[in-house]
Amino acid sequence: MGKSNSACMDMQVMRIAPQNGGSLLSPQKLYIAMVGLPARGKTTIAGKLKENLERDGIRTRIFNNGQLRRQLSPDTAYPEFYDPENRAGVAFREKIALTNISRAQRFIQGDGRVAILDATNVSFKRRAKIRNLITPQPILFIECINNDERTLRASIERKVTLPEFGHLSQDAAVRSFIERIRYYESIYSSLETEENFVKLDSLNNQILREQISVDIPFYDRIRDCLVTDIIRNLYLIRHGETYFNLENRIGGDSGLTKNGEEQAEQLARYFDRISVPIIFTSKKKRTVQTAMPIQERQKDCAIIPIEEFNEIDSGICECMSYEEIREQMPEVYHSRKVDKYNYIYPGGEGYVSMKERVDRGIKKALFLSSNSRNIMIIGHRAVNRMILSHFLYRRMEDVPYIYVPQDKFYHIVATQDKKLFQLKRYAE
Ligand code: F6P
């Protein structure tokens, strides 16, 4: 599972007091302030921390400025509201920030242990205000950084499904959100002089830099949580039967057969009582067609096609059957048989060269799935083998032979304290 301590690239940890998990006399308390441009995964990280801390009875609450803003004034989605020159907008956002800070203080003065201020907090001025109001309690700033254009775009596309963008077309809403981000960029100052901070690559769960100058309660477990991929319920499914499957042909972009459509219906019925808010597919027809009946039967479900989950590119062999390859390109057929993992199709890919992009797809899917308890990936035979081996260690040479049937799916759970892999039958 993705623990990337080795990924700590620029570490400056200065602890001046020994760390302990709690004291009998006065329970340790902590404020965490998230920092980052919109759509960088702050709320996801905040939710992940809360879940992790609460599992051990550490009372944690998130104070989210965006949520409060939408409650108080739903009509604040237009970009100029975020213009630092817009006095009324600035005053309103300031009021929201102060309200949440004082709610967090009341929580901490009571029996709360960790208060998470979930907001952009990108300006130095705002952070100074938080520090002044909260001192002498320790504050840990966590800055979420993700500049991967494609993930960002997909993340924005999800954000604009919020009701506050309901009056705009998708394109107009995306443009408006991007403009909002520009305003935040104009006042952005990255963490540098704060006493205690972590800069996190929130797409790859990597700590880019950390600086800890006082005793931060629960720091080790917070850090551990930040660098760990958490998969609550991942349903890993292969698309239904296609016309190419019937002829044993590989690659291409064939559609589902009648039987494949029936498999998709059976899957949809199987998941009737399991909520699936997001289905990631590849960009290929067969995976999207398999997802559609599931989406239809769910209450609120988005299909997000990700090109990183496309099937292995078999280059010059695309659309051929295994028999045709054996007859017409025996050298390809035999070389692949000898070392299937490392063999790369001429003009295409091999398992070995797919790994990087599939891992990237997994990171992207986890980033976009926010705090959804259940996510589904509908992929292909080779891609699903790679996804499975990301979570469940398999010897390299065994990966291309992992069983990936079309009438069953893998249910995967991989959290800090639980790992589960089950092959389940959905076909009736
Ligand atoms: O279903 C067929 C398929 O998904 C092909 O598109 C792909 O090339 C193949 O399976 C991958 O399986 P293998 O690596 O065993 O050939």
Image (cartoon, grey):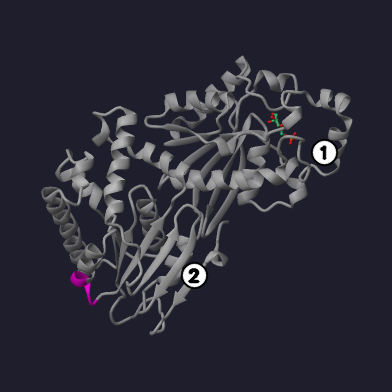
Q: Which residue is mark 1?
A: 336
* Residue 160 is one of the magenta-drawn residues: no
32 versus 329 height, above or below:
below
| Quadrant of image for the C terminus | top right
Is residue 146 among the parts visible in the rendering? yes
Residue drawn at x 24%, y 48% is 66
> Given the image, on which type of amino acid does mark 2 rest?
Asp
Is residue 275 among the parts visible in the rendering? no
Q: Quadrant of residue 327?
A: top right
Image coords of residue 424 (percent x, y): 60, 37
Range drawn in magenta: 132-136
Residue drawn at x 74%, y 19% is 247
Q: Nearer the viewer, residue 345 or 370?
A: 345
Q: Which residue is mark 2?
A: 10
Q: Earlier in the sequence, mark 1 or mark 2?
A: 2
309 sits to left or right of 181: right
Image coords of residue 255 (percent x, y): 60, 19
Q: Is mark 1 within 8 Å of ligand 1?
A: yes
269 versus 307 height, above or below:
above
Q: Nearer the viewer, residue 34 or 271?
A: 34
